[in-house]
Image: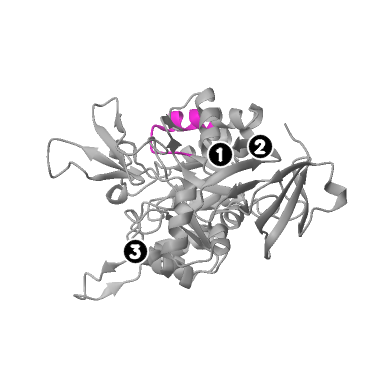
Amino acid sequence: MNTNLVLYNGKVVAETTTLENGYVAVGNGRILGIGEGPVPKEYKSYEPIDVHGKVISPGLIDMHTHGITNIDFMNASYEEVENALREYAKYGVTSLAPTTLSNPIDIIVRQHKLIREVKNTSSVGAMIIGTHMEGPWLAARCRGGHDLVYLQSPQPEVVDHVLREVGDILASVTYAPELDNSVYLTEQLSLHGILPVFGHTEATFEEAQASILAGARHVTHMYDTTLGYKENPEEALVMMPGMETAVLMDDRVSIELIGCPVHVPKPFFKFIEKVKPHNKTIVVTDSLVGTGLPEQTVLSYEDGHQVYVEDGVLRMINDDPAINGNLTGSAVTLNVALRRLKEYAELKLSRAIEWASLNPATALGVERRTGSIKVGKDADIIVMDEDCVVSLTISKGTVVYDNM
């Protein structure tokens, strides 16, 4: 339920500046006032929240996440999606794009319809910006955790079917631009206002450029299942430019990194901060089932394989020592990803927050209403300490997590 609130006695990370002793006033789900010093008299009747010197930050946006705790967006029920949203709030996420992975098209469509229903009817549904479809239009060699049996090229009739059925809830679609009909897919996504995203790809420079021309504007988890360069088959030891060169050269294309040193070696964080425009850098979780569970938690799957949680990733349990301990996916929460980003790229907290708030909002085309603390925007606000431990989460003016 929306109430009039005023958060005060905190470090406010506003859109254009940081206020060391600031306040933020919230009413009717929106940000009504921002300032420094004592709370003005016009907000004296608002419910006061003393944040005791902590950081008042824009809410975090996770534009690539498959699940959390024991909930997988690929097979979750309505109630499980709702429960997942409440779990994300504990880690400062006020908006997200629930992500599906490669499966039969009818199952993918079914899940996007279910998530659309949650968005439209649940009390916490406003946290859903839209959905992210990752696969089945991916390169086989770069499939990562996606099952080979489901991978395919984007046939026009299938693309048209997906867009008819769930085009209104799709926020983004990840695909490999080297596949047949990828330019058609890119054009259709662009026409529907859906973000075309490169991922799970070994595309050439020319293949990537063709889809950028058609409207591709983002890269899914760069440096993880994205092969950027190849040796020239006609000239030994001469490297040919690939997808990485195309997206680094084009300032219209944003790049996301998983906030985990296993998936992305640390130097890449500082590298992307250096070479991309400051509004084109994004940190995500790509989180799976197991995220947010205690260290060493063991998870069992229907096919009998098991994994365990360790330091923000999932690792395989297997009798074969060559397989046991192998990386299987991410289990990092976005506040931890933010803390790591700050450390690895040597950023001020206010700059790191842009990677997880305004920049993903900009990529998804919702920056006019969320992603920063600015008067008139949605009241998507969190309170956390300098180590990114979250104590309060407000989504659209409603408190959805409170550990003050």
Of the pair 106 and 1, the residue shown nearer to us: 1
Mark 3 falls on what kind of element? loop
Q: Position of residue 339 (x, y in %)?
A: 46, 55
Q: Residues within 10 Å of mark 1 (few under 14, many from 20)?
A: many
Would you say 245 lies left or right of 26 here? left
Instruction: Evaluate if marks 1 and 3 touch, with contact meaning CB atoms under 8 Å apart.
Output: no
Q: Which residues are magenta?
A: 99-112
Would you say 83 lies left or right of 155 here? right
In three-dimensional space, the C-alpha distance between marks 3 and 2, rounded to whole angstroms, equals 43 Å
Occupied quadrant, residue 37: bottom right
In three-dimensional space, the C-alpha distance between marks 1 and 2, rounded to whole angstroms, equals 9 Å
Amino acid type at mark 3: Gly
Of the pair 25 and 355, the residue shown nearer to us: 25
Q: How many marks?
A: 3
Residue at image point 55% right, 51% down: 195
Q: Which residue is mark 2?
A: 399
Q: Position of residue 239 (x, y in %)?
A: 28, 73
Amino acid type at mark 1: Ala
Look at the image and say whether residue 264 sits in the magenta stretch: no
Q: Which residue is mark 3?
A: 228
Residue at image point 21% right, 76% down: 235
Q: Which residue is mark 1?
A: 89
Of label 1 and label 3, which has the lower sequence position? 1
